[in-house]
Amino acid sequence: MTIDAHSSGRTSAPADQRLIYARPEVLADRSTHYCPGCGHGVIHRLLAEVLTELELPAHTIAVAPVGCAVFAYDYLMVDWVEAPHGRAPAVATGIRRVRPEAFVLTYQGDGDLAAIGTAEIVHAAARGERITAIFVNNGIYGMTGGQMAPTTLLGQKTTSSPSGREPSLMGYPIRITEMLAQLPGVTYAARGSVADASQIGKLKAMIKKACRVQIDGGGFAIVEAISNCPVGWNMTPQESLDHLRGPVARAYPLGVIVDRTGAAAGPQAGSQPAGGPAAPGSASVQPEA
Amino acid sequence: MTAHHEGSGPASPPSPAGMPATISAGDSARRSRVLMKGNEAIAEAAIQAGCDAYFGYPITPQAELLEWMARRMPELGRVFVQAESELGAINMALGAAATGARVMVSSSSPGISLMAEAMSYMAGSGTPMVLVNVMRAGPGLGGIGPSQSDYFQATKGHGHGDYRVPVLAPASIDEAVELVATAFELAEKYRTPVMLVADGILGQAMEPVSLRFRTPERRTGDWALTGAAGRPPRIVKSIDLVPEVLERRNLDLQRKYREIRRHEVRWDEWQLEDAEYAIVAYGTAARVARSAVARARERGIKVGLFRPVTLWPFPERELARVSQHVHGILTVELSSGQMVEDVRLAVEGRCPVAFHGRMGGLVPTPDEVLGALKALRGKVQRAAADPALHHDGGRS
Amino acid sequence: MERSVVFAGFGGQGLLFAGQALARAAIKDGLEVFWIPSYGPEMRGGTASCTVIVGDTAIGSPVVDRFDAAVVMNPPSLRKFASTIGSGGLLLINESLLGEEHSERTDIDELRLPCTELAAESGDDKLVSIVALGALVGRLGWVTPDSVRAALREMAGKSRLGDARRREIVEADLSAFEAGMRAALPVQGLAPSV
């Protein structure tokens, strides 16, 4: 890991000590607006580290969602455009097509990506747009006060499912990353978690891989991060992490869902689509190593 | 007809019957014009204006515009994407335009409704873009016939929030070609989305086009997203949760709109010099009105045409001046009467304002308009003959 | 001064093409012109049509309430457009498909031509609308025949077919156009309609 330790006096180490961990320069030196215990801060940090390690910040144009992460532009010091609710993949498509040299990143929550923005994410993936999508799934609409999301677990109480999510009335949770992984335009799809240090390390590797796919000229890459919302879930931060590790991870299995980086020609927007639909089974969840 | 205000001389005397004898031979420039379909001419004008990227979704009656772009843009190494929806198309445009690219999107009425959201974001964030609406009849899915029933939508804000966009309304295909370049110019000069509104007739018809294409000079600002190499990051956004800051942003927008009102009003006048009555109409309706004016003049009725070219900013001062010299104004639209509200605001009761319109994809005939004009004149004359009668603004 | 004509018939009879040829010819003569296909509500009733308006100044209304001429190539078109012709106007009826049908109007010039047979005699029985165009131009003279010939050459030139086939198409179009012109020569003692 290479971290620029010279950007801030606060991160430089005394002469007799070795600096092993510091704030990446691309991460703003400020506290976030996120609630205590929220997973967004961790995911921002991972993104900052990956962008720095891959020397991407100066080339990045990122797309902010509507939702809690709308202010991501206050923390990741790259160029940002704010998308209307759910439209980030379309906005990113526009950037991608006119700026082939840019690194294009979207950051969306589950309401943004898996409810109001399903058409945009599905078709960006179907076109194999060369963009990297970060999908933060905490199963709730946090910013508007904890309403039911498309990813809310069955039985989960929210302010708009006060008696718990009842499938006959409210349907079932969506595993949208698995759905997307069926599409040949998707080069890489994986799901990680912010539940503990070990999971966070694996999540970082997934994000790095998804970024590399874009750098290497692959197609659409998505990393879903299951995350916690202590306030929206009405739990303490510790309880929320236990919940994330248990019921949430059972509903949303962790691991690489599809990896077509080995395929002869990664499908990609602007090139001819490669072949037909993926072979059966190629988009099933592969258990983590 | 040109995009800028141009007064015309008095009506030429009607020609005697017999076309070959009376048609004067045109010059070589007229002879070298090319017959083009409206939708295709608008598309090519955008290409010649330097449009870098086009995003669209098929809808009648503007599908030929999308098809022209699908063929031509890749030929030129430029960007064409058929989006998954009008939402997709307009948001792709938002993304591309945020990087400083010259971008156009087109659709027809139902699709334009879907684009209201992103238009509001672009107005709020100062993102230049040109949106073409080849209007069809509504409401709802309505029909595919020509219409001007999106006037309110185009001129009063389209999406949510306090914003306006310049709206250009060509009345011929040749003028549409010119106004496409103007649209890109205004978009970049004022950092705003701009709408060009045609209707199904202008989209589907063919007319001679001069091929006087224009490529406006690019105005790239210090706001475009290009990657923050060697400079602080840039953000293209409309959100501000601090009311005082958001109000300042709004005040800045309103300042911009005042500038546009001051400098960008465009209109056209025909035979108004000695007119006792004026017809106000834009786009296709203005062409019907032009024929009605010619027929009325043949019958000795002194009437002229006032044609707004910018629907916003509306030529209100110019129309107010006209209203001081005429006995009455007839507004003609392919709608239930939308622009007529702006006409009345501009006229401020100085003379009666009557309205004639058709809906559903129908277009009034010149004789219909002539009839409405005669009705207005009759009412005005009766009121003049009997001072006890006050004019009622033509509303009854 | 404006002159308007509607070409109406079945889809596939080449009416839109004939209208475009007239429009291109008008440009070559330095005139103003407006062409619009049947569109929107007008498409109902089993006819495809296009309107062409030719003039010496900017064309006004794109909708025409009194046509100066109508070319009707099938029965529904006759019923739809016969009443829309202004007094003294021209009604060109394709006898091949309309037989004895006529307009029952006495104030217009009704020109009846067996377009299919004329087209067949000139080499290609499909070119009924080009025959009608020839008759229209021959009878009314709104545009010069040379400009129409040039327009027909130009339009065939846009075809993606090979040169030999393109030449054949041009020859067939020109021959059909001449056949229509000849058939419409003003009858002795009957003045041109407008």
Image: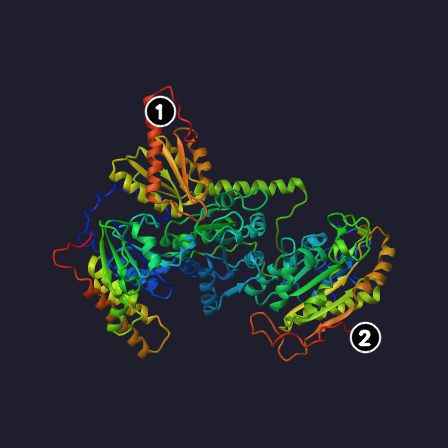
In the image, farthest residue toward the left: C189
- Identify residue type, mark 1: Ala
| Front one among C188 and B35 | C188
Query: Which secondary structure lies at badge 1?
Result: helix
> What residue lies at 85% left-to-right and 54% top-to-bottom?
A237
The colour scheme of the drawn protein is: rainbow
- Residue located at (58% from left, 73% from top): A273
Label 2 near label 1: C-beta < 8 Å? no
> In the rendered image, is residue A11 in sight?
yes
Q: Is residue A244 left or right of residue B136?
A: right
Image height check: is B148 above or below A285? above
User: On the image, which quarter does residue B246 sit in?
Assistant: top right
Residue A264 horizontal side relative to residue C48, left or right? right
Q: Chain of mark 2?
A: A
Name the residue nearer the viewer: A54 or B58: B58
- The residue type indicated by label 2 comes to Ala
Q: Which residue is mark 1?
A: B383
Estimate the spatial distance between the alpha carbons at disc 1 and disc 2, rounded to whole Å.
Answer: 92 Å
Q: Which residue is identified by label 2?
A: A289
Q: Is residue B382 left or right of residue C29?
A: right
Across and down, in percent, residue A19 comes to 80, 65
Could you tell me which residue is drawn at 41 percent across and 52 percent down? B179
> Residue A170 at what x, y percent from top left?
75, 54
Name the mark nearer the viewer: 1 or 2: 1
Observer-nearest of B190 and C117 = C117
Judged from this view, the residue extending furthest toward the top is: B388
Residue B213: quarter of image:
bottom left
Question: Is residue C58 among the parts visible in the rendering?
Answer: no
| Residue B287 screen position, x and y as percent | 35, 46
Give the chain of mark 1. B
- Same chain for mark 1 and mark 2? The answer is no
Q: Horizontally, is B87 left or right of C126 in the view?
A: right
